[in-house]
Amino acid sequence: SYELTQPPSVSVSPGQTATISCSGDNLGEKYACWYQQKPGQSPVVVIYEDTRRPAGIPERFSGSNSGNTATLTISETQAMDEADYYCQAWDSGTASYVFGTGTKVTVL
Amino acid sequence: QVQLQESGPGLVKPSGTLSLTCTVSGGSVSGHYWSWIRQPAGKGLEWIGRIYSSGTTEYNPSLKSRVTMSVDTSKNVFSLKIDSVSAADTALYYCARSPEARSGKRYFDYWGQGTLVTVSS
């Protein structure tokens, strides 16, 4: 089965840039998206189709996807960005959605 | 604004059947893909499967043998059944919508608030 691997945790200082990776075989050939999940809340998409931001998502969230790795970048990180982040892709081989293992972002 | 609300028993006995319903308001189930996703406490997200409004389904291969999904367009709801449950099925269960059918985009734009299902005797 297709797997997406993320680092368990990322720490960042306020105002700095946080980078979260998502690795999977030939992930760059698929579209990746990213969800933010705060404690006790449902996930919210912050990036879809590798680089697109839904309405209402701040410009400090950006994405890229190439080779085997998709990346979510949070620029000028704020305390409110502290959350769990999950990547997700569609695996056409099994006709399944696949989620990454999740990354906890801590703003120190 | 589309809203999704999960409902169903919060406690299921081992070897029993987990049954949940997702009620869609502010929009129609017709013409969209609807998924179930679960999250054990303190763990990550797992996609269970999806159903199109016509009734076509696709399931996570790891759960396929135990999962059944259905849709009732007249009631604007869709449902999930998981057979032969065990403690490993204890999780927060979400229903969610994908805009794929209308736009080709494969992600989840609307989520329910989730419902906790515990498998225990």
Image (cartoon, grey):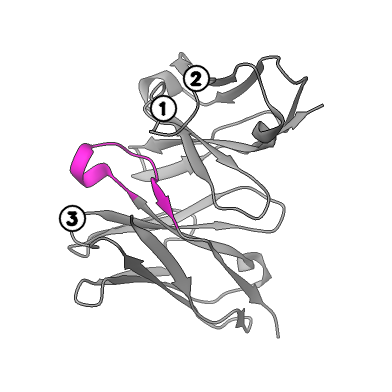
Give me the C-alpha separation between circle 3 and circle 1: 24 Å
Q: Is residue B14 left or right of residue A48?
A: right
Q: Amino acid at mark 3?
A: Gly
Q: Is residue B68 left or right of residue B75?
A: right
Residue A62 has which mark? Answer: 2
Local SS, label 1: loop
Residue linked to disc 3: B31
Residue at image x 19%, y 61%?
Answer: B30
Which span of residues is magenta-colored?
Answer: B98-111
User: Circles 1 and 2: CB distance less than 8 Å?
Assistant: yes
Q: Chain of mark 1?
A: A
Residue B94 colored magenta?
no
Give me the C-alpha separation between circle 1 and circle 2: 7 Å
Q: Are marks 3 and 2 on the same chain?
A: no
User: Circles 3 and 1: CB distance less than 8 Å?
Assistant: no
Residue linked to disc 1: A53
Residue at image x 35%, y 53%?
Answer: B97
